[in-house]
Image (spheres, rainbow, N blue to C red):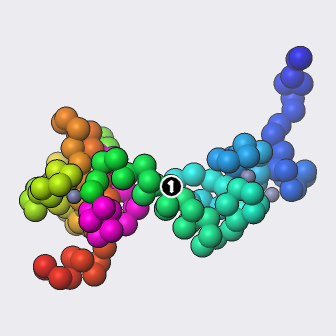
Amino acid sequence: MLFDRTEEKRCTRHPMRKADSFCHRCKRHFCIDCLIEAEGYYYCGDPECGGSGRELAATAAAETNQKHAELFCPECISTTETEIARSTFTLNGCGTMLYGSGRKCPKCGSEESSAWWCLFFIPILRDGRYRVRWFGSGRYIGRKIKAEVLGKHA
Ligand SMILES: [Zn+2]
Ligand SMILES: [Zn+2]
Ligand SMILES: [Zn+2]
C-alpha cells in the first residue's frame, strides 16, 4: 500500500495536533501532552500501557530492576536506584564521566564511582555516586546509590 506522503502522524487523542512521539508499549502516536516519560521511554498512560504517573514509574522501575538482576546482586540492587548513569558521552572532553572506583562488591563485582560533569576534561561538578559494572573500556551500566545508603558510610 502506498502512503500519502503529505500525511503527518497525528496524536491519537487530539487529531488536530501533530504527534511528537509514540507510546513505547502500544506504539500509537501521541502529542507531547499525552505522553508520560518513565525510565527513558514515553508511554501513553492508558491502563493497559502501565497507567499514569507513579504507577508507570513503579512498573518501569521494576522492569529495569529485573533487567539489572543479571548484572547486580540483590544487595546492590536494593541499595541503588534505577536511575542509571548517563553514558559517558564526551564531546571534546565535555560531558559526564565516571571517576574513581572502590568498594568492589564480592558478589557481583560492581564498584562505586562518582559521576562528574566535565568541561574540557576537567571535572567541574559532581553528579552523584553510582554503583557500576564495567564491560571493557568506556562501557558500563551504573545505578545511582540511594542517598540514605551514602549517608551511612560518608
Ligand atoms: Zn500506550
Ligand atoms: Zn494528544
Ligand atoms: Zn553486588
Residue drawn at point x = 49 percent, y = 61 percent: 62
Provide the residue span drawn in magenta: 74-88
80 over 147 or under it: above or below: above
State the image coordinates of residue 99 (x, y, percent, origin top left): 15, 55
Inspect the image, locate mark 1, and give the three-letter code of the amino acid beneath it: Glu
* Horizontal side of residue 111 vs 9, given as left or right: left
Asked whether, in this view, residue 137 is left or right of residue 74, the answer is left
**Is label 1's Cβ within 8 Å of ligand 1?**
no
In the image, 103: left or right of 54?
A: left
For residue 44: magenta?
Answer: no
Is 13 above or below relative to 146? Answer: above
Question: Quadrant of residue 149 in the image?
Answer: bottom left
| Helix, strand or loop at mark 1 | helix
Which residue is at a point 75% across and 63% down the rendered structure image? 47
Q: Which residue is mark 1?
A: 63
Residue most extreme to the top: 1
Q: Nearer the viewer, residue 143 or 14?
A: 143
- Does any portion of residue 32 appear in the rendered image? no
- Residue at 68 percent across and 68 percent down: it is 52
Where is the N terminus found, in terms of image quarters? top right
